[in-house]
Amino acid sequence: MTVHKKLMQARVKLQSMTLKKSGFNSFSQYKYFELGDFLPQCQEIFNELGLCGWISFNRDCATMQIVDTDDGTVIVITTPTADAPLKGTHPIQQVGAIQTYQRRYLWMAAMEIVEHDAIDSSPSVDESKKPVPPKVMKGTTPAGTDLGPWAWKITASPNDDVVAWVKIVTEVASLSLSAALVEADVVAIFRVNKAIIDQLKLQDESAYELVMAEFKVARQKFKEPQ
């Protein structure tokens, strides 16, 4: 049996199992898989079929090798890496956090684990009525960057000045939400800027909580009878 056929069988076996999602996104109200929710099952299946998952890291990417323990053939999966500076932690703790995320994504790719799709769950909006988003604060828009009408274009880095960066993010979030005309706008603002919001949580959890509270208030406003 080839390594590809074994991997396909492993995916089918995993799909027949009942997996419980322990992660929860409080804003968009959906659950997601943590690494521990599926890794033990994956390891059991791999061992049964004669497969071994081996993950390694370097500065640019994380690599997963799926090795057939019978004949030594290999499937290789890679994913780019990124910095994740955690406020109040040692560098080695930051490395550990990055590696945990990378392991989760690699196993999910290998086993074709499907999660909630934030784009499909977003309410549709009439393009003809789509509002023009607010201008971003001076000094935060990089030239040639266009990630969508609601994207926060911030050139400042938390590595340079955390306090200033947090202030910019919180103010831009408030400006964007104040311009939202429908619930779909609020969802879109959160979705396209999720990477920045996640970074805010790492740098200043109290500021993150305030921003998330603003999102909830803005979304609730459109749910209430007018």
Image (cartoon, helix red, strand yellow):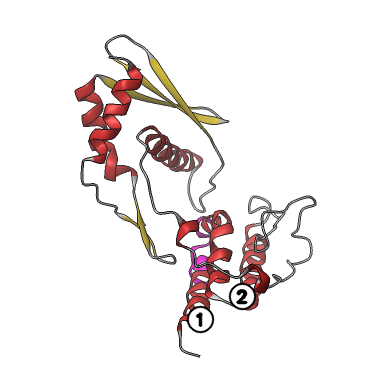
Q: Residue at x 43, y 65 (%)?
A: 28
Q: Residue at x 28, y 21 (%)?
A: 51
**Residue 164 at x, y percent in the picture:** 67, 62
Up-down relation of residue 40 to residue 21 (above or below): above
Q: Residue at x 68, y 62 (%)?
A: 149
Disc 1 marks a residue whose amino acid type is Phe
Instruction: Report if the CB atoms under discs 1 and 2 are less than 8 Å apart.
Output: yes
Horizontal relation, residue 48 to residue 27: left or right = left
Q: Is residue 206 magenta?
A: yes
Query: Which disc, if any, is residue 222?
Result: 1
Up-down relation of residue 96 to residue 66 (above or below): below
Query: Which disc, if any, is residue 137?
Result: none
Residue 152 falls in which quadrant of the image?
bottom right
Q: Is residue 97 magenta?
A: no
Disc 2 marks a residue whose amino acid type is Ala
**Residue 128 at x, y percent in the picture:** 67, 71
Up-down relation of residue 218 to residue 89 (above or below): below
Badge 1: few (under 14), some or many (20 or more) residues near its Cα, within 10 Å?
some
Residue toward you, 86 or 146: 146
Q: Is residue 19 visible?
A: yes
Say which element carries label 1. helix
Q: Main secondary structure of the magenta part?
A: helix
Q: Residue at x 37, y 45 (%)?
A: 114
Mark 2, residue position = 180
Horizontal relation, residue 180 to residue 118: left or right = right
**Residue 203 at x, y percent in the picture:** 54, 57
Question: In which quadrant is the N terminus drawn?
Answer: top left
Badge 2: few (under 14), some or many (20 or more) residues near its Cα, within 10 Å?
many
State the extent of the magenta-drawn residues as a range. 200-210
Say which element carries label 2. loop
Mark 1 and mark 2 lie on one chain; the one further toward the N terminus is 2
